[in-house]
Every structure is written in structure tokens, then in C-alpha cells.
Image (spheres, rainbow, N blue to C red):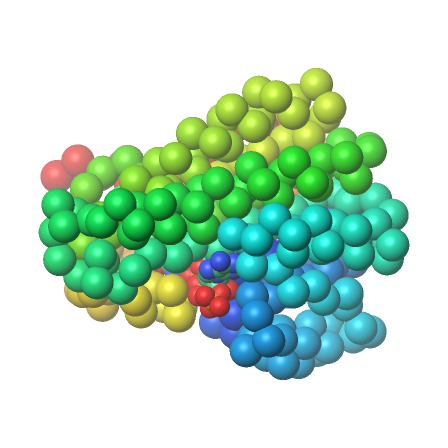
Amino acid sequence: MLLEGKRGLIVGVANKRSIAWAIAQAAHREGAKLAFTYQGERLKESVSELSATLGGASPLFECDVTNDAQIDATFQGLKEVFGTLDFLIHAVAFAKKEELEAEFLITSREGYRLALDVSSYSLTALAQRAVPFMTDGGSIVALTYYGAEKVIPRYNVMGVAKAALEASVRYLAFDLGPKKVRVNALSSGPVQTLAARGISGFTDMMKHVESRAPLRRNVLIEEVANAAVFLLSPLSSGITGETLYVDCGYNIVGM
Ligand code: NAP
């Protein structure tokens, strides 16, 4: 029960395959009380049905992370139901499909703005509102990918967005350290999810990892979730501003 008595907000559940949902299940297993956001009415039912399986009704808030009014309303609602907050999971990303299919060179100004807004700036926007409720310190974890650091063909503008996300993690960690709020990135290897299906050639990416990663396999979503629990829990109390790779070792291989 590593998270017993802790209250957390999970941002980024779309369906049962979402990494955010795997993290929610693991956090629940460890004793956390959870609230969820969903993006638009379309996803309300799915997130509501999933959260109900954890037993008891979890607070749910509509939150498009590009909409400041909805972010404000989410934290106003959280204040009423939870009072204080111990952790936040950021597991959202978006880029235009056509910009994940061709060369990075074709990225449009609007596509760049959109990808960076949804996938990077949103962490800062959420942290601004979350921190006042983290009165006893806290932990913020953002999901990232190796394409932030090395060129992964067709990951394109999302790689740039993840690079900005990882840099934001470091700057936020620096600002929030004195408030005892830790901020870390968790870099997951490829996992079959809705967002992943939008990346052209994703299946080939998984095959490549399987053949090259030191563990000769792809990471399991449960392994990503357990690492997130570690970053949320007191076991990682000395770690902030880091990017933790949970990718079967793929990132260490040069050739
Ligand atoms: P997912 O289930 O599709 O989750 C992505 C979530 O982002 C969805 O809930 C999506 O909602 C949400 N989202 C997109 N735009 C949003 C907006 N404007 N406001 C609020 N929410 C928005 O896919 P996932 O793979 O679990 O992704 C979770 C995180 O893990 C992402 O940051 C992703 O980059 C990261 N990650 C994934 C992998 C992988 O291989 N799957 C690897 C490393 C890192 P909608 O469905 O409504 O758009």
C-alpha cells in the first residue's frame, strides 16, 4: 500500500488500453483515492465506466487541456471533493495525423502549435493549478517517449513536443522543489494504445524494439504503471527532474 491515504488526479484516460488507466489501476491497488478527467462528452461514458470498476464513484471532470476555463473548473471541483492533492499524472498528447506520417519538414505552424500546446504546455498549466493543493508536498509524473531525444522516423513534431515536455519537467522540478513537490518524466517504450495507433509504422517500431532492446521484448503496460507508482510514492523521495526510462533498456543501445 505505497499510496495509502494519497489523493491523485489522473489526466489522460481514453479507454481500457490507455497508459493512464494502467497507472490508475496500479495506484488504486496501492491505496490511492483517484479523480479523473476526460476530454469531451465523447469520452465521459468510457472513463466513467472504467473508474466505476475501482469501487465507489470517483470524481470526474471534463477537461480539454487546451482550455484554461476547464482546467480551472477541474481544480475548483477537486478542491470541493478532495480538499488537498498528493499527485498528478499527465498522460496526454496530440498531433495532427498527417504530421505523423510524412517528414518532419512538412510540419505546419498550426500543427506545431497544437502539438506543443496539448502535449507540453498542458503540464505547466496543470501544475500551476495543482500545486496550491499540494499542501503537504506532492509528486507530478508526465509520460514521455524516446523520440524527444533521438530521431524516431515519423514521430516528428511529437518528438519536439516531448523534448519540450522533458525540459518543462526539469524547470518545474527546480521551481517546485522548495515546496516539496517533485516532478518527473516517465519515458515508456512503445505500448499499443489509441494514441500509438496514430503513429504511422508503429507495429514496425515494436518489432524493432523487440529485436534490439537488451531484454529482447517490448515493455508491458503494467511495468510502466508500476514505475509510475514508484515515482508517485515515498520510495522515490530523493528523485526530481528526472526522466526514467521504462523501455526494456532500448535507450542505452547505440548500435
Ligand atoms: P491514449 O490512451 O490515446 O491517451 C492519450 C490521451 O490524451 C487520451 O485520453 C486523449 O484523449 C488525451 N488528449 C488528447 N488531446 C487532449 C486534450 N486537448 N485535452 C485532454 N486530453 C487530451 O494513449 P497513451 O499511449 O496511453 O498516451 C498517454 C501518454 O503516454 C501520452 O503522453 C503519450 O505520448 C505517452 N506515451 C505513449 C507511448 C505509447 O507507446 N503508447 C509511449 C511513450 C509515451 P482523446 O482520445 O479524446 O484525444
Residue 7 in view here: no
Who's the residue at 69% across and 72% down the image? 51
Who's the residue at 43% across and 38% down the image? 165
Q: Quadrant of residue 124?
A: top right
Residue 169 in view here: yes
- Number of dots carrying numbers: 0
Q: Position of residue 118 (x, y in %)?
A: 45, 50
Q: Is residue 236 above or below residue 74?
A: above
Is 45 displayed left or right of 170 in the figure?
Answer: right
Q: Nearer the viewer, residue 237 or 71?
A: 71
Q: Is residue 218 above or below residue 3?
A: below
Q: Quadrant of residue 193?
A: bottom left
> Where's ligand 1: which quadrant?
bottom left
Q: Position of residue 233 (x, y in %)?
A: 68, 42
Q: Quadrant of residue 21?
A: bottom right
Q: Position of residue 35 (x, y in %)?
A: 73, 60
Q: Nearer the viewer, residue 215 or 238?
A: 238
Q: Position of residue 172 (x, y in %)?
A: 56, 28
Is 136 displayed left or right of 174 in the figure?
Answer: right
Who's the residue at 68% across and 76% down the image? 48
Who's the residue at 57% across and 70% down the image? 40
Is 16 displayed left or right of 237 in the figure?
Answer: left
- Quadrant location, the C terminus: top left
